[in-house]
Image (spheres, rainbow, N blue to C red):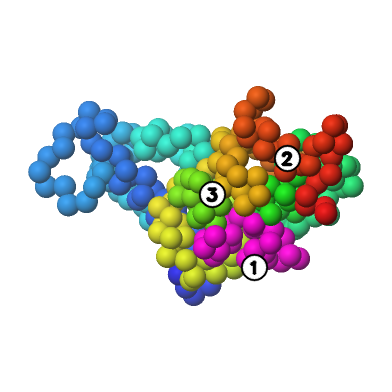
Amino acid sequence: MAAPSEDRTGDPAAGNRAEIRDFLVSRRAKLLPERLGLPTGRRRRVPGLRREEVAALAGVSTEWYTRLEKGHIGGVSEEVLEAVARALLLDEDERTYLRELARAARPARRAPRHRADVTLPPSVQWMLDSMTMAPAFVRSGRLDIVASNALCRAVYAPMFDSGTTGERGRANFPRYFFLDPGSADFFVDWEEGARATVAVLRAEAGRNPHDRALRELVGELSTLSPDFRTMWASHDVRIRHEGVKRLNHPRAGRLELTFRDLHLPLPQRAVYDLIIYAAEPGTPSEERLGLLAGVNHGRYTYFAET
């Protein structure tokens, strides 16, 4: 399977066109005609809307939209992109992804700049370490955990101890989800979490199409995991990933944690996020998280450090 933004010949431009085509076709296929007040008819050979119906809803010609769906998007104005997004009922994350694909398709005046990994300022680690009852970590666009506090390492011990850790021994969410069989037992809502993980990774591929390490990661997972191949082919996109995480922890038992994703501005165009977890006060999960942290009369001795 070709990696994102690169076809089988290694041509990035052709790969970008394929990404655009597959994304737009997948969104069109998801729209039922009756949802938009269109007649269903009896001769629909494929699910979803026809190209001419999307074109009419966007206010463009069928020929023009067909060319757009073939990946020729580089010279398209923001207004037309927005019209197509409205016609396809794209959500905000999908609209952002479409704009990123259009940006990547435009002729570059100079060689594309790669977003390099950066060394986090020491203050970021101090901040993480100060969160004694909140598992917290910094995540790269490839979903590596690049920094974490002790309670995060205790909560995610199965992932940190997994043989799927990647470059520099870093835990990586996609590799753990799809290459470690134990992840299905650890994550209570495994399929939901796996789909969200792929959707976040898909958004990063649109945002940073020249990331070779990302292409290699997607290629590895596509080769080794049928589940990943299926989910990647759905072209679902998610920019932010927030909600509730339910875990079957081998030492603490069932944990239900709320988490938030906060953007962490860094130099060199690096795109990292700060993820913070918390248990609802007064719940069994708060008590179990405290036990995992080693809370004893106000003193904290983290299991992960012993």
Tag 2 near tag 1, CB within 8 Å: no
- Secondary structure of the residue carrying tag 2 is helix
Give the distance between the C-alpha atoms of the residues marked 1 and 3, in whole angstroms: 17 Å
Q: Which residue is mark 3?
A: 187
- Secondary structure of the residue carrying tag 3 is loop
Q: What residue sits 17% from the left and 52% below the top?
A: 45
Please indicate, yes or no, whether residue 166 appears anywhere in the rendered image: yes
- Secondary structure of the residue carrying tag 1 is loop
| Residue 265, image x, y percentages | 76, 41
Q: Which residue is mark 1?
A: 163
Q: What residue sits 48% from the left and 41% below the top?
A: 94
The mark nearer the N terminus, 1 or 3, is 1
The three-letter code of the residue at mark 3 reads: Phe
The mark nearer the N terminus, 2 or 1, is 1
Crowdedness near tag 3: few (<14), some (14–19) or many (≥20) residues, C-alpha within 10 Å: many
Please, is residue 5 above or below residue 62 in the view?
below
Query: Which range is magenta?
Result: 158-182
Q: Is residue 88 left or right of residue 260?
A: left
Give the distance between the C-alpha atoms of the residues marked 2 and 1, in whole angstroms: 26 Å
Q: Quadrant of the C terminus?
A: bottom right
